[in-house]
Image (tube, grey):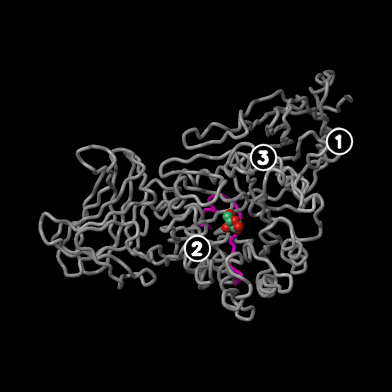
Amino acid sequence: MKKLASLGLAAAMATSVMAAGHDFEINVSKKGAPIQSTMYGIFFEDINYAADGGLYAELLINRSFEFPNHFAGWDISGKVKLMADGPFDKNPHYVRMEPAGHNDKHTMIENRGFFGIGVKGGEEYRFSMWARVPDGGNAKIWIDIVENATMGEDQKLGNVGIDISGKEWKKYTAVIKPRRSFDSAHLRVWGDGRVTTDLEHISLFPTDTWKGRENGMRKDLAQALADLKPGVFRFPGGCIVEGTDLETRYQWKNTVGPVENRPLNENRWHYTFTKRYFPDYYQSYGLGFFEFFQLCEDFGCEALPVISCGLSCQYQNSIRDEKKVHVAVEDLDPYIQDALDLIEFANGDVTTTWGKVRADMGHPEPFNLHYLGIGNEQWDEKDNPVFTSRLKRFMDVLSKKHPEIKYIGTTGPDSEGWKFDLLQPRMKELGVDLYDEHYYRDENWFLGKAKDRDGNPLNCGAMRYDSYDRKGPKVFAGEYACHGRGKKWNHFETSLYEAAFMTGFERNADIVHMCTYAPLFAHVKGWQWRPDMIWYDNQNMFKTVSYYVQQLYGQYKGDNVLACSMDKKPIAGQDGQDGLFATACFDNEMNAVIVKVANVSDADQEVKFAWTGKAKDLKAGFKSAEQITLRAVGMDDENSLDNPLKITPKTEVIEANANEFKIPAKSFQIYIFKK
Ligand code: AHR
């Protein structure tokens, strides 16, 4: 092995010789492409009960009685009537509770939450409802958090009474403190049986939400997102942006303003996979565009909303029915107007129509929107530019009126193939700033070994972007995850391959400007799609190994790529490199050189780092260094609710100028050398 160029103290180590290994040469002076602040982000879609029943901390299902089955999620007894002339015009239904007819009988409604209601003993829960006594008088309403699982004397975990008076609708609130924890409680609302009472928008939140907000997010889940240090946040989907039909597409205007008056929408994930069918899965929009923007602000990241381009889901709708299921190109104006209004909602001052809506919601300052996605997984037919004809209409108007915004198109649902081949050049022609690529692919693809049906190698793995056109739009890898063949869960092996693959993002930071793993969230009892990054039940959550991979990239993002070679050859994919994938960067704030290496082979690998560059940069050496290791005992090992910390990154301090390392078989290592 050659004598290594080394920094300061490392000279001492240069005498040791390794039997076999690989030499990395990293130029600490030559700062390459900047790594964008948006590089590693998060993608939110309401799939797997990610919003209602997940991040959105509301504990009651169907709180406004607007599900098509108006009592879905509710058990009723006594004299309960459904009424339809309530105080909120977009959610007009409410319940009338009449006296049950005898002092010993009670009219009662009971909500079962999302797979039950998770409560923690000793913590506070804010109950609220709108109510009135239509015939006058005073009513007493009891609110009980109950459980039926134990043999205790009293089902109540906690309760509170509320006095209702007045014929006008008013909002009532009360705090309940359950005596002990329970993950599948119910909420019971019942009257003293004497006075007819109307109830609407019945709601229960933990008071301890993320940042203590009333219409807040589940704290543990929001914290997990913040801990990713995301640079960009794409929302609100995914396929739900498009809708199964235009009527059910995501319309952002329905998701802002008072929560009581945000109309319900269906959620396509309730019926998409008939093997996992969830008839009570709807979108309440309690988590809407205002809340998404607010989260972006909390996380200090760029917001990236995606809007419908006038095409409903192309998987679900044959293009033969184009006129019926999609908006004709000449009728797109209202859709384009929605996009313009969204920019005004985010950035307009308080005197504008939509800026005022934002201000009325408590945020007079602009949200500083810089990015907008147009369409999700859209594509052109070979003989019909279904998507690009629409995208062009949007681009013609938007880029003129708002040149300050960066627009994001798409290369469709596939990482390669005819749809991709058609769209990629068209994105360049249309002048979008970035295009969104999606790939849920297997191990071979992530390792750069996948072939097409004719045996030709696909452009995949960590070298995918090495050959991309440098003059085209930038890349947003908007949805990706390694799906293990025959296994579709978050086991260690697939996460390791994601880590290896992501070295290609960093090395190609000149054109890859954003990437977001998908999907983000899943309720263990309500998932439709896996793998996912973060899993939870009603009380607890766990982070998958893929989460930790994303977090490590986010935390050790760096500011500029550093030139890094292996055995005097440029770093690319796996071939000829013994299953090693690597990349190096410089981080200004840490004043550190960061080297990331994934070893996907079955053997431990000995490596040596040689530092090159200007004498002044090499002279002082490093002051301190750390090594972070992510590895597991078995390739199928995974984190779980029972064992959430089974596989986590381990950090150790290493000698500042060490330069010889053993990269364990099947591991991901990060080295941080601080100057
Ligand atoms: O992430 C799940 C789905 O995968 C998204 O909704 C869609 O964009 C893709 O097909």
Could you say which is closer to the camera, residue 21 or residue 431? 21
Q: Residue at x 42, y 58 (%)?
A: 279
Amino acid at the residue labelled 3: Tyr
Asked whether 323 or 2 is in front, the reply is: 323
617 w.r.t. 249: above or below: above
Give coordinates of residue 627: x percent, y percent. 68, 29
Q: Residue at x 67, y 72 (%)?
A: 386
Q: Residue 357, image x and y in percent?
A: 47, 68
- Magenta region, residue range: 292-311
370 vs 44, nearest the viewer? 44
Q: Which class describes the residues within 10 Å of circle 3: few (<14), some (14-19), or many (20+)?
A: many
SS state under label 3: loop
Dot 3 corresponds to which residue? Answer: 556
Residue type at tag 1: Lys
Which numbered disc flags the more N-terminal residue, 3 or 1?
Answer: 3
Residue 666 figure quarter: top right
Is 148 inside the magenta-drawn segment? no
Decide: few, some or many residues near mark 1? Use Cα within 10 Å; few <14, some 14-19, many ≥20.
Answer: few
